[in-house]
Image (tube, grey):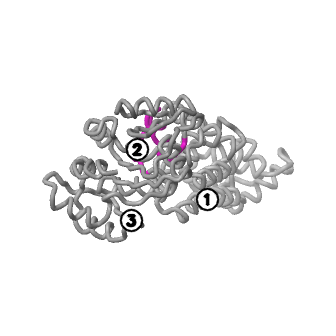
Amino acid sequence: MRSRLDQKGTLEGTVSKQNASTAERMAVARLVGRTVRSGSSATVSLDQLDEALRRDAWADGLASAVVALVGPVIGPAARRAGRESWQQVADILRDVAAERPALTSWVESTLRSGALRRATTTADAANALALRLAALAGELPAEGEVLGVLAARLFGDAHALDARTPLGSIATGLAASVAGLPAGNGAGWRRSAWLACGVVVDELSSTVLAVGLPGGTGSPTARALAALAVAGQPAVLTYRQLAVDDVGMVPPLVSVCENPAVVAAAADRFGPAASPLVCVNGQPGAAVLRLLTSLVNRGATLRYHGDFDAGGLAIARTLARSAPWVPWRFRAKDYRAACEASASTSEFTGVVAETTWDLELAIAMDELRLRVEEESVLSTLLDDLSVV
């Protein structure tokens, strides 16, 4: 009877037991006040049973008695409402994917895994969580905002995005997806995911590598840069330094590379004469974005070079959203020339996507599908740096 209430919401008709014993058939007859019937089954009219209960034992009737005996019944209307509520949760996240197709894989993975169901107790709570994730997606990538500050600004709670909160645990996957990083786990992956989309987990873990920045005398960081420039040594700056201190003089042109090997080679070759060069070191983190946007805002022009592969193009697009740059040997003609000259190319995987700084580059890379790493064109890049 509980199963029937679950499915139909009402108790009508009959219930039967096949191969009932004589004692069972007699019990049914006594229950509804009738003579024992012949045969091998016992059948009860639910209408008669409801009437007998109301008259002799349970004034609220049969359905109420079933609930009292076996516990609450969800019923078809409640089930339908529950399905609709969970569908609304899915729709909120799929709207995010509709606006940003790059997040489709994360959205579908989150829904398939049941992460929101595990993190909440009701569809209403999951709905609120999905709305928070949608709001966060609209703010990423950020421009060097501290995680606690971002959480307080969006949700009124500086700890809302902490790793152990329901929102924080799911939001880290969102951050990784925004940054184009693979799924993972652990504290290191979490820090990398947030940093890669411009959010500082803590002010000292996000750093940027540079050489040849002239520095100045206006702050401890500017003086440190000046001393390192004179010594021809690269500098590692933390987000905290960049948030608090001025970096000194701003060169009119700053070269930007993807890989630390370029900075090391420039320091080795040019020493104190090294021209300004900043390394994004993969997906640009908060410190990188803070330094480069500051340089641009103060009049510097950035020229960028990265690896010729799907990941390198994704990094270039991420950087361009925060700090505009011009290509530095990063056009279709440069790619084709590098493919012809290099003996160490290999095929790359992944989607090339649009290259707004040179539309022909995406066409050439889709055609050749060869990876050209910065290290393989290092001598050409260093020659360029020697004449800046």
Measured in 3D between alpha carbons, the distance from the residue under mark 2 to the one under mark 1, in whole angstroms, is 39 Å
Does residue 134 appear left or right of residue 304 in this picture?
right
Other residues around mark 2 within 10 Å, as few (<14) / some (14–19) / many (≥20): many
User: Element under label 2?
Assistant: strand
Kind of residue sitting beneath label 3: Thr
Measured in 3D between alpha carbons, the distance from the residue under mark 3 to the one under mark 2, in whole angstroms, is 22 Å
* First to last magenta residue range: 180-199
Kind of residue sitting beneath label 1: Ile
Residue position for label 3: 355
Give me the disc on residue 278: 2
* Residue 167, position as x, y percentages in the image: 60, 42
* Residue 94, position as x, y percentages in the image: 55, 61
Give me the disc on residue 92: 1
Residue situated furthest left in the rendering: 343
Does residue 300 appear left or right of residue 133 in this picture?
left
User: Element under label 1?
Assistant: helix
Residue in the image at 56% along x and 43% along y: 144
* Residue 385, position as x, y percentages in the image: 31, 49
Report if residue 247 lies within the magenta region.
Answer: no
Q: Is residue 93 visible?
A: yes
Q: Is residue 14 visible?
A: no
Disc nearer the start of the sequence (2/1) = 1
Other residues around mark 3 within 10 Å, as few (<14) / some (14–19) / many (≥20): some
Disc nearer the start of the sequence (1/3) = 1
Residue 37 picture quarter: bottom right
* Residue 179, position as x, y percentages in the image: 46, 50
Q: Which of 274 and 324 lies nearest the eye of the viewer?
A: 274
User: Element under label 3?
Assistant: loop
Residue in the image at 37% along x and 34% along y: 234
Kind of residue sitting beneath label 2: Val
